[in-house]
Structure formats: structure tokens, C-alpha cells
Image (cartoon, helix red, strand yellow):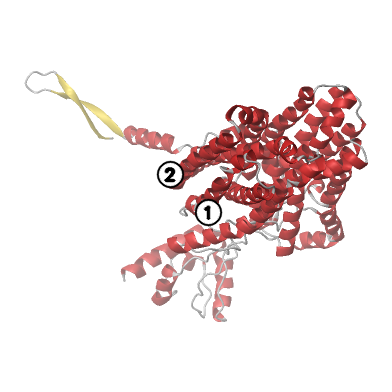
Amino acid sequence: MASRQIALERIAEASQENSAKAETDSIHESALASHGMPSTNDNGEDKEPMAATNTLPNNNDAHEPSAEFVPEAQLETTEVAPAPEEPQLLFSAFTKRQKLFIVIMVSLASFFSPLSGQIYYPVMPTLVKNYQLTPALINLTITTYMILQGLAPAFMGTFADTGGRRPAYIIAFAVYTAANIGLALQHSFAALMVLRCIQSAGSSGTVAFGYGVIADIATTAERGKYIGPMAAGVMVAPALGPVIGGLLAKFLGWRSVFWFLVVISGGYLVFFVIAMPETARKIVGNGSEVPTEWWRMSVLQWLSTRIHRLQKESDEEQHAGEDPQQQSEQQPRQTTKLKFPNPLDSIAILLEWDALIIISYVGFVMFANIALLTSTPNLFGPLYGFNELQIGLCFLPFGVSSCFGAVLYGKVIDYSYKRTAQKAGLPVNRQKGDSLRNFPIERARLQTVFPVMAVGIVAFIPYGWVLQQRVHLAVPLVLQFVIGFCFVASLNCLNTLLVDLFPDRPATAAAACNLVRCCLGAVGAAIINQMLSGMGWGWCFVFLGLVMTAGLSLLWVECVFGMGWREKRLLKIERKKREKEAAEAGDIPVEDKTIEAQNAGKENHVQEVVLDPQTDTVAGTETRPN
């Protein structure tokens, strides 16, 4: 009976709040109840059916409900009825074919930056003769290229996260293509230096953009197999670049190298504008929404929108009489405005302990990788008497194995994720995505790095001794194959983890990694010859191998403490988000509300002076209710 009385009191309160429209609502509800149908509230949600009555309630009935109006059994059912759950949307609305197309496009885009750096090497001797310069001055064009390759993504990566992927790609390739045209037409060393910097600035951001696109369309459970092909494009280019550059320079002249880049980059830009959709989740959500601005759409999306414009206008006319709340839910997502990129966002990533550890080890591996590739022309030429074309062909084993390592090991990364989830008793949803709040993603990713990196280090350490002993050519090429597979596989794992740790700004995180990677790569390319001559070939590669071995201890620290660091960062982000929302809504912060409540309580009390009865002096004060 207590629950009955409480329910009756709740009905009375609700009736008083809706007294203005009680008569019309009661008539409507009674009519529905007589047919056994549930009524609906203002929001369109179903209410419990009311008992049918033979008389229509008047205004007095609305204010004084009787016990016979609603049965007790029905009241108890109303109290325990669960609220309907909102269906969870798919993580990505793109189909498998669309995802495959997007991955191919970003893989091709990531191919240009390393290709431009490596295709330039075969034409350097010709440029020295053409401009009558020293090799040291020509080497400055390589140094400046690598510096811009590290700095430019710090700007463009942030721009891709805030302004969208399509504008970032289009601007990058427009600048890159224009720089290649200038390089093909220039006639001075100063123009060569400046245009190489512009070429690097245009192409270097594409790698960071690619990681952002993969994070947009792939869940954490399937991210490995999508990042693999994109990483393959980054690692295959250094192997193919010298071969392509050598062939073009030999048969068509050094300017043909830059005209070749103009043709392929311009063709890619045109096809990108026509077919590539926007994927940034801040712009299109999970991909089911079409951008509102025409310049954010692909040409195919724009044509489709024009064709269906009449149908859209008719739908708007049908929904013209809906409630304002329902109309606001049907309005398209408000897109973010283009803002000038802030490079400090990438620097801020390096201030996080987990990101710093991962990026540092990526830098160690890339230092050793660049040292191996840069030393190959200087070592293989004198040892085996190869010309430039033959030396370029020696890069193929490394390039082929890098491709295999990126593609095949991506499936191993996804399998490790699934196995870790099963051990932790957590579900895996490849369609709607998983929450990483209580998931040991660090252990899931890093446990695939240790074994493959150990094999790579074992193959890397004796590489210098093999060359120093002038063994058969097959031995160093086989070692290059193993090193390429293992290094790229491990880098793939680390880059995937970096994207997992910063899902809200993946391109910015990739840009921070690219900054460290390119800077250490530039240092490696500059000092590797001095290291080889000072330490000897054998001990030089032993030293680099020991550095990578020691760096594995940092990854162990990340595996143990990374989840705690990630949780602290998430709590900090959530606190800032709440403060921002409260400031925008004009609400009083929680601390201010507490102080205000305390002050309000004090205002309802007064203080009286208490006198000592013996001395008739003030003994203190006493607070009592007013």
C-alpha cells in the first residue's frame, strides 16, 4: 500500500504541472485506452496504457485523481519499466570496398615523401657538374629537405585533425606539384635549394594524414591490417626511388626526374579531388554524413547531392511542422572552421611519457635504418665494383621485405589484440569499436614488438662485420631482407599504438613522431660516414644494435606503466571538457557552488553574544537559526 500511495502522489504532481492541457490530454488518452493502445508524451515516447473509463474526466479529476482511475498493478509496472536504450552506431559507415579504396589512396599518398627524397640521389653527381659546385653544397639540399620533412607535419598534422583530411591533402599536393614544376624548370642553385624545401613541405605531411585517415575508418581491433599497407608505401619508396631516379637520369636526363614527379603527383591530385571522400570524424561523423560545404565534398559526392536536391527539399517541407527539438536533431552536423595550425600541439604530444617512449624508440630504429640505407652506396660500390644502377638494385631486397613486413604483420597485430581481449574477458566488436578505458592496449601492441625486434637486431649487429670481411653479395642482401621485414613490422606496431593512445588527434600524434623520426634520420645520414670511418664497419653496426637493444627496456616500462599514464591523461581531458561546457553554459563551477551553498546556509543563522555569568564579560558567540 505504501508503493500505491507514493505512485498516487506522483500522479497528482504530474497532473498539476499539466493542468493547462489536462482536458485535451485526458480525452486523447481515454480514447486510446478504450482501444487498448498506449498513449504518447510530448517527446513521442510511449506511456503505459490507462484504464478505460465510461466518463470523460474534467479539470477537477485532473487535480484530484482517484484510486480507481489507475489500477495498482499497473502502477507497479510503471515503476519498474526500464528506459529504452539508444542503438549504438557503427564505428564506420564505409563499406569494405570503400575502406579498401581509401587505404589504397592514403598508401599512394604516403609514397611521395620518401620517394622524393630517394629519387634525388642519382642526379646529384650531374647537378654538381651542371652548377659547378662541390658535393658538400649539393648535400645541403638533402639536409634542408629532411629538416622541412620533420617540421612541416607539425603544422599540417594539426590542420588535418581540426580542418579535415581532404583540405590538408589537396593543399599538400598542390604545393608539392607546383614545387616539382619549378624544380624541372629552374637554372640556379638558389632556386634548387628553395624549391627542394617547398617540395619537402608539401609532401611530408601525407604520412601523418594517412594515420589520421586509418584512425577515422578502422576500429582498434582491425587497425593493424589497415595501417600495414600504408606503412608499406612509406618503406618501399626508399628502395624504389634510387632505381627509378637512376633509370630516368641515364636515359632522359636529370630534369625528367622532376617531370616524372609532376605527372604522378598531378594525376593523383585530380583523382583525389574527384573520388576521395572526407573521413575526419569531426566533419562527417562515422562517414554517414555528407559535409555541408561544397569544397569538403568530392566531385562524386557533389554530383550526387545535386541530383537528390529536389528530394531533400521535399523532405524538409514534410518536416516543417515538427517540434523545434525534433527539427534540431535532423539538422546536419556543424562543421569546424579552418584554423591556422598550431605546431605546439605536436610538441605537446612529446610531453606525455607514453608518447615520448614510443616516439623515442621509433627514432632509434629509424636512425639505424637510415644509417644502413645511406651507407649502402658508399660500401657496395668499392666492395663489389657496382655502378649507380647496380647499387640501386641492391635496395630491392630491403624494399620487398619491408612491404611483406608491413602487410603480413598487420594481421599479427590484430590477432594479438583479440587474444589480449579474450584473456581479459573483454568483448571485441569490429563493427562498432571497443572502449579502451579498461583495456591493456599497451600490452596488446607491444607484445608483438619484442620478438620481431629481437630477430631484427640479431641480423643487424653482424651486418657491418659481413661487409668488412668482403663475403659473397648474397649474405648482406639476405641480412637486408631480414632487417627490412623486422624493422618495418616493429615500426608498424609502434605507430598503431601511438594512434590508439591519441584517437582524438591521430594526425597530430603522427606528426610528432615524424618530427623526431626525421630529425634523427637527418643526424644519422650526416654522421654515418664519420662513424664508419672512426669506429670501423663492424663496431659501428654493433653499437647501433646495442642502442636498440637497450631501448627495448623503455618499451617494457611503457608496457607496465602506460595504462596508468593513459588514465591520468583521460581524466585530465574529461575535467577540462566539463569546465569548458560549464563556462559555455554559464554555470557556476562545482567549487563555487559549494562555497555559495555554505554562505547561503550561514545567512539563515544569526550569532548571539554569550556573556559569562560570573564576570559579566563576553565569553564568545553562539550561532542559532534565524
| Residue 508 on image: x %, y % | 63, 40
| Residue 436 on image: x %, y % | 51, 53
| Residue 363 on image: x %, y % | 59, 37
Q: Earlier in the sequence, mark 2 or mark 1?
A: 1
Residue 604 in view in this figure: yes
Residue 336 in view in this figure: no
CA gap between label 2 and label 1 equals 17 Å
* Disc 2 residue crowd, few under 14, some 14–19, many 20+, Cα 10 Å: some
Q: Does 21 appear above or below 391?
A: below
Residue 323: quarter of image: bottom right
Of the residues shown, which amino acid type is indicated by label 2?
Phe
Q: Is mark 2 on a helix, strand or loop?
A: helix
Q: Is mark 1 on a helix, strand or loop?
A: loop
The residue tagged 1 is 448
Q: Is residue 217 left or right of residue 77?
A: right
Of the residues shown, which amino acid type is indicated by label 1?
Thr
Q: Is residue 175 left or right of residue 409?
A: right
The residue tagged 2 is 561
Residue 24: quarter of image: bottom right
| Residue 467 on image: x %, y % | 64, 41
Question: Residue at point 56% right, 78% down?
Answer: 37
Question: Residue at point 49% right, 50% down?
Answer: 442
Question: Residue at point 47% right, 54% down?
Answer: 439
Q: Does 58 appear above or below 368?
A: below
Q: Which of 613 and 20 is in front in this view?
A: 613
Q: In this view, does 460 lie to the left or right of 298?
A: left
Q: Residue 168 carries which label?
A: none
Q: Nearer the viewer, residue 333 or 449?
A: 449
* Position of the C terminus by quadrant: top left
* Position of the N terminus by quadrant: bottom left
